[in-house]
Amino acid sequence: MAYELQRQDSHRVYDYIEGDGYPGDQQSLRLRRGQSRMSNQNYHQYNWSSTPAEQDEESSSGPPRDLRSIPMPMALKRATRQVQQMQVPVVSRGESWKRKKTKPLLKLKHGIREFLYFFSLWRSSLQKIGGNFGGGVQSYFLFLRFLVVLNFVSFLLIAGFVLIPSIVFRHVGSSLVNNTGPEECMVYDPNPQGLVVFYSYFLDLLSGTGFMEYSYLFYGFYNNTIVVDSNFSYNIPLAYILTAVFYFAFCLICIIERMGTAARVAVATGGSAVGNYSLIVFIGWDYGCLGDRATKLKQKNIHYRLQVDLEEERIKKQAATLTSAQKIVLHSLRVFMVLVSSGLIVAAFYGIFEATTYSQKQSEAQGILGLIFQYLPSIVITAGNFVVPLLCDQIALIERYSPSTTVVVALLRAVFLRLVSLGVLLYTLWSQITCEGGSDHTNNKCTLCQYDHMTYQCWETRMGQEMYKLTLFDFLINIAMLVLVEFPRRMVVDNWSNKLAQWVGRQEFVVSSNVLGLVYGQTVVWTGALFCPLLPVINTIKFFIIFYCKKITLFNNCRPALKTFRSTTSTFFFLVVLTFGWGLGIVVMIYSLAQIRPSMSCGPFRFLPIMWEIVPTSFYNLTKTTQEFLFFIGSQAFSIPLFVLSCVLMCYFVALASVYGKSVALLRAQLKLEGRDKQFLVKQIEQFTRKQIPNQHD
């Protein structure tokens, strides 16, 4: 019997023929359901009777499929593998040689991946966090692990080219002594004189002064040692500056590589909840989960991801129903809130400027009071970074953005506050070290040495001390918040049943503020790496301890967030924010290398007008062939063709990406149309079935 189903709105006719199916040889939904009940499984059928030549011809018609990607039972896959190994394919010598060489490489590649995965840092902890608190919170800990590995590898780079050679060659090579400058500019004696009070060592450890100041931790301890032998030569100043340059380049490469991975995931989901929903439903389950515990964790992870998508769609539908007057009121409210948040941020900047200026004026104070004065900029920066984001979060609630947009807006405001507050601190120090770049003619402190040698005998070490104090103070604040705030709050909420305790409740793990703490700490390290070479290893230890502190407070003191957000877009955004911090650090390094006069009394560049001068000086000490080769690389004969070739390749990849983007957009539109058609057909079948049931009873 044949039935005709006609869609009135689109004038499209679908002919349903019982036994034959839909056009395109696709069976109806009812017949599929009936056949699925009768058949056991619908697995991929392997053609056992085909000859090797026929299989080779079939495989040559399209790209070969990996047996692991075919939906078949494991027993059938093993049998298929045995049959394939027994058959002798008809291939050429070149193809045979290629297969023999490719197979060991693939095995080695898979072996390395499995080895790295087995020894990956905090693998089980991250799986547990993702299962209990969702992918958004898990993305924070993944970001933290990335920074730990990045800082540790960076320390190995610095230790291999600067620290270890400085220790080995300190008393072997020849150190050049600066005899060309004034004697007043060469005074630098960081070692304390006479008896020292026992608690001063603790104060020196916190402030980076005393025995800490003249050590390998800071710039001033490194000599301008040059080791020259008949078969070996090593230039410590050149190694110092080139290591700093390669350190920043290495960090940028790692960020871009990880950003590309996150961008591919975001593109795969289409940047929408629909694509993410499809990925969760069809490929979200991990079949490697063993045991009830791992299964429950994965179920919770999928639950939170679906919760985010549903929340996003609910807010989008709510925003679509607003009238024009309501939209005008909403946008006016958002503009006003932006002005209020900007005023709070500017007030924080002014407080940091005043605190830094006052702290530098009181730098001669001793004891506990002197330590407080030294930490005054760090205290004000931390207080501003704590209070202002809390107020901005309350402002973001009034603005009524979607969860993902709220996180992005809060993160942008906090990023601007933290990075610019660090920039205000650096600007204040720069204005005092260089007497505002030499523009302050009323101040004679910078006339003799081109920097304030009376207050800052070794200004690079002072800069390193400020970054060291910021890093240490940020770590101490994290520990203090865990011990003095988060655990007492949980104990009060769990043991008291009054309304105030229940209203306060357990705290939520706010991803945006915690990510900002990591970005701020890493930015401080990048800013001070030139002046404090061991700051990356200090930051590695700091982040390593913070991981366990955050994990403890997450499972013991926090509840699952009421408003979660999508981890696919947040991971990419975290790396973009981290790039801003890297940009601030590279600006500080470039300006210090090319503009400010190095200290004449300390460091590996004490005899040079600027730090970068060591590069051309060392260049002219190379052999003539090497100089000609480097000159050719920097000449127009090499750079112009390279630039043209780069432009051609860039245009090619841009055009290729545009074509792929259009193809993906067309496929998505086609999938949407097919989905609507299927929904229409299902509705028509249901209506037809309802009509047929009364007729059968009659």
Image (cartoon, helix red, strand yellow):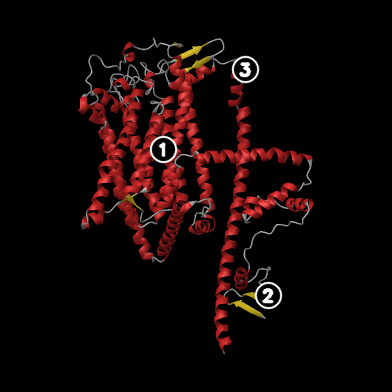
Residue 207 lies in quadrant? top left
Disc ID at residue 625: 3
46 lies above or below 432: below
Q: Which residue is drawn at 49% across and 36% down?
A: 252
- Estimate the x, y position of residue 21 in percent, counting from the top left: 66, 72
Describe the element under mark 3 as helix, strand or loop. Answer: helix
Q: Mark 2 points at which residue?
A: 19
Q: What residue type is labelled 2?
A: Gly
Residue 415, visible in the rendered structure? no
Circle 3 residues within 10 Å: few <14, some 14–19, many ≥20? few
Q: Looking at the image, is mark 2 or mark 1 earlier in the sequence? A: 2
Q: Mark 1 points at which residue?
A: 581
Estimate the spatial distance between the alpha carbons at disc 2 and disc 3, rounded to whole Å. Answer: 82 Å
Circle 2 residues within 10 Å: few <14, some 14–19, many ≥20? few
Q: Mark 2, mark 1: which one is toward the viewer?
A: 2
Q: What residue type is labelled 1?
A: Gly
Estimate the spatial distance between the alpha carbons at disc 2 and disc 1, rounded to whole Å. Answer: 65 Å
